[in-house]
Image (spheres, helix red, strand yellow):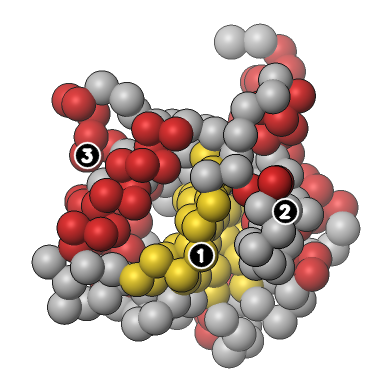
């Protein structure tokens, strides 16, 4: 492991806005579950997640525009979270936190109906069929989101991977969820007017755009009765 990465790991342990659940936190007794707004953020504002947040561009970008909403970036890689967490501290963003966990454990950290929106920004497409359950828009993950989202809350996906985009649309359609906005070529589509979806760009997104790749986008909501 490089010295720079080791330095980031050391620093992140001291960041007040990074929560790294230790082994003594059993998954069904996490301290902030159901109480993120009241006990951690100490307000009653809505809570929005960026799952697989990487460097936290959306977590911090949205937080700056929406100070009356709480944002949590979720990722397992501490060296990635470090950048977003440091930026939030430097800018004094009190409505930002980062949670270092595996995404598949998300229901152990958020109560039913606690979350008001989810962003999935350039997740690993997990192209192998054997890895389908790892895709962040697989039926297994959509079920987890249903468990924690307020009814009607949006889920946003941005990806450069057409296969993941098509897969997501297929799953949404088969399960009867609501597609509210979509584009196979976001930056050439004037019909997509979702606030900030074109204004905030991740590190990887900028790379993809330089390479001439199209960015795909869909916003959808989950129906509890969908199959």
- Residue at the right extreme, as displayed: 91
* 137 with respect to 195 (left or right): left
Considering the image in quadrants, where does the N terminus appear? Answer: top right
Q: Which residue is mark 2?
A: 198
Q: Is residue 5 above or below residue 186?
A: above
- Nearer-N-terminus badge (1/2): 1
- Can you tell which mark lies on residue 112? none
Q: Residue 14, how many percent across, how many down? A: 68, 45
Other residues around mark 3 within 10 Å, as few (<14) / some (14–19) / many (≥20) = some
- Can you tell which mark lies on residue 133? 3
Q: Residue 145, how many percent across, how many down? A: 32, 63
Q: Which is more foreground, mark 2 or mark 3?
A: 2
User: Picture quarter containing residue 178?
Assistant: bottom left
Q: Nearer the viewer, residue 49 or 124?
A: 124
Q: Which residue is mark 1?
A: 181
* 60 with respect to 177 (left or right): right
Other residues around mark 1 within 10 Å, as few (<14) / some (14–19) / many (≥20) = some
Separation (CA) of disc 2 from disc 3: 29 Å
Separation (CA) of disc 1 from disc 2: 13 Å
């Amino acid at each position: 492991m490089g010295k720079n990465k080791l330095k980031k790991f050391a620093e992140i342990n001291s960041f007040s806005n990074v929560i790294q659940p230790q082994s003594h936190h059993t998954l069904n007794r996490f301290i902030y579950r159901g109480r993120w707004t009241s006990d951690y953020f100490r307000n009653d504002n809505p809570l929005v997640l960026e799952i697989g947040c990487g460097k936290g561009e959306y977590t911090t970008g949205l937080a700056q525009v929406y100070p009356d909403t709480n944002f949590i970036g979720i990722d397992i890689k501490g060296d990635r979270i470090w950048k977003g967490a440091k930026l939030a501290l430097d800018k004094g963003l009190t409505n930002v936190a980062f949670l270092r966990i595996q995404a598949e454990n998300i229901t152990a950290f958020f109560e039913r109906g606690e979350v008001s929106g989810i962003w999935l920004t350039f997740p690993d497409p997990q192209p192998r069929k054997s890895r389908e359950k790892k895709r962040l828009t697989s039926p297994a993950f959509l079920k987890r989101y249903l468990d924690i989202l307020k009814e009607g809350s949006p889920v946003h996906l941005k990806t450069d991977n057409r296969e993941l985009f098509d897969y997501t649309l297929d799953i949404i359609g088969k399960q009867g969820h609501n597609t509210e906005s979509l584009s196979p070529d976001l930056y050439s589509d004037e019909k997509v007017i979702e606030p900030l979806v074109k204004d905030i760009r991740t590190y990887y997104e900028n790379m993809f755009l330089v390479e001439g790749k199209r960015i795909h986008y869909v916003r959808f909501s989950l129906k509890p009765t969908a199959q």
